[in-house]
Amino acid sequence: SYDATEYVGPFTITESTVVKAIAYDNDIVESEIVTAEFTISQATDNGYPLPFEEEFDNGAGSFSVEDGGDVSIWGSYEYAGDKGMQATGYINKSYYEAEAWLISPVIDLTKVQGATMTVTEEVNKYFGNANEEATIWVREAAATHAGDWVQLPVTHPTVDASKTWSAVTPIELGLNDFAGKTVQVGFKYTSTS
């Protein structure tokens, strides 16, 4: 005899758990214990869990920063309740030449057939050419080495002539070429002095 709950029909699981079951036949002969582990993931609007998400509410979060210069180009910001990461080569009233990266941890896409990435951003009017100076890259992340970076095609939002910043805009980028693999995403910012 076991100290357990008897279920005679379906039951609902609301958190990750291990279920152990024993079945009895009509002669009350019990089966072996069968064990199943269920993992509950946060669902998205379309019902599927996200393989990765970073809000940048607390700085770079799980991303790493590679500034590659004498000044910190990437930094966190908060404005009107919004938080995120920003890159600038204009620091203390001086322009700095820089190539700086914000790089994700390894993201597991091995269980997906198709993948997209949504980046929410805004740009300011001081870019020379945002499409060349603020680029987004992805690379395969193998266990022994990282692959070459591949630039994703991005068209950044435009800034109205009467404004300093563009509207906050979500941009969807296709990652289908990387579905079924592990990857890293890199945001690359360049500036001139």
Image (cartoon, helix red, strand yellow):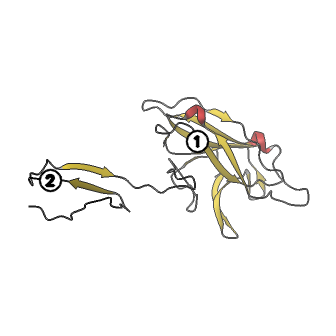
Residue sitting at 33 percent across and 61 percent down? 11
Type of the residue with mark 1:
Val
Q: Residue 107 at what x, y percent from top left?
A: 50, 43
Type of the residue with mark 2:
Tyr
Answer above or below: position of 25 versus 163.
Answer: above
Secondary structure found at label 2: loop
Image-based side of 53 in relation to 188, left or right = left
Q: Residue 138 at what x, y percent from top left?
A: 60, 37
In the rendered image, is residue 68 in sight? no
Residue sitting at 27 percent across and 49 percent down? 36
Query: Depth check: 24 or 40 in front?
Result: 24
Q: Tell me which corner region of the image, top left, top right, bottom left or bottom right, holds residue 154.
A: top right
Q: Callout 2 environment at 10 Å: few (<14), some (14 to 19), or many (20+)?
A: few
Image-based side of 140 in relation to 3, left or right = right
Query: Depth check: 121 or 187 in front?
Result: 121
Secondary structure found at label 1: strand
Residue at image mark 2: 24
Question: Depth-wise, is mark 2 or mark 1 nearer the camera?
Answer: 2
Residue sitting at 21 percent across and 63 percent down? 6
Q: Which residue lies furthest to the front in this view?
A: 26
Image-based side of 35 in relation to 116, left or right = left
In the rendered image, is residue 170 in sight? yes
Marks 2 and 1, how far apart at CA:
52 Å
Q: Residue 95 at what x, y percent from top left?
A: 77, 50
Answer above or below: position of 85 versus 147.
Answer: below
Residue sitting at 81 percent across and 43 percent down? 129
Q: Quadrant of the C terminus?
A: top right
Residue at image mark 1: 185
Q: Quadrant of the N terminus?
A: bottom left
Q: N-terminal of the two: label 2 or label 1? A: 2
Q: Residue 10 at what x, y percent from top left?
A: 32, 58
Q: Callout 1 environment at 10 Å: few (<14), some (14 to 19), or many (20+)?
A: many
